[in-house]
Image: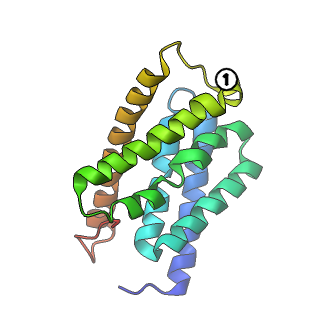
Amino acid sequence: MKRSPTFRVALGGICLALTLVFMFAGTVVPGIDLTLFALSSLFTAVMIIETRVGGGALLFFAACLLGFFLLPNKLAILPYAAFFGYWPILKFFLEKIKSGPLQIVCKCVFFAGLLCLGLFGFRELLAQSVSLPGYPAALLVLGGTALLLLYDYVLTCLINWYCRRIRRDSVDLKLS
């Protein structure tokens, strides 16, 4: 179904506002900050479903920019900007791969590379805001990859819920 430009702009504003609310809550509510950042990525997926990838990318960049100016803790935007915000965009492209196991391998390889970059390349920056246990890096990468697969599954379930319950005109719509 073709959406009007007015609908797309209004939806973008609503999704941006909700993204910023979840990001703000992630900076002030201790203990569930990563969960709130993960939930904020759902709105990028909604924009991709409704307006295609361009709308999702625009929402991601606007949320990063406004988050930098509006969030009280500037370093707290890092999880959203470095991973959660663009994961639905990357998920959209990776799920175009026909082979399910190859999709999972590509997701895991990308995340492991990103996590290694974070652990080794930006350890000094991360050491100020995140306390990492003294476990071997390989164990941290394996544990992080398992959490990625859980996050990706939950995001897929939330996207399917959105398509079934809120966007009823196309029940079988997926990101890919």
- Residue 73 visible to the viewer: no
| Residue 10 in which image quadrant | bottom right
User: Amino acid type of disc 1?
Assistant: Ala
User: In the visual, does 41 lie left or right of 65?
Assistant: left
Residue 168 pos. (x, y %): 27, 72
Q: How many marks?
A: 1
| Quadrant in the rendering for residue 165 | bottom left
Q: Which colour scheme is used?
A: rainbow
Q: Which of 17 and 87 is in front in this view?
A: 87
Q: Residue beneath label 1, please?
A: 127
Query: Which residue shows up at 25% across the image and 64% down it?
Result: 98
Residue 60 lies, with reference to residue 30, above or below; the image says below
**Seen from this angle, which residue lies furthest top?**
134
With respect to residue 48, does 24 lie above or below?
above
Helix, strand or loop for disc 1: helix
Image quadrant in which the N terminus is located: bottom left
Residue projecting furthest to the right? 69
Q: Which residue is drawn at 54% across and 85% down?
A: 5
Please state which of residues 90 and 63 is positioned toward the viewer in this rendering: 90
Q: Residues within 10 Å of mark 1 (few under 14, many from 20)?
A: few
Question: What residue lies at 43% left-to-right and 74% top-to-bottom?
Answer: 50
Q: Residue 7 at x, y = what percent?
A: 50, 80
Compare residues 16 and 133 and report the one nearer the observer. 133
Instruction: Report whether residue 94 is seen.
Output: yes
Image location (x, y in percent) of residue 160: 28, 59
Give the residue drawn at x 58%, y 38%: 26
How far across and down, in percent of the image, does residue 96 sit?
33, 66
Dividing the image into 4 quarters, which one contains the C terminus?
bottom left
Is 63 placed above or below 6 here? above
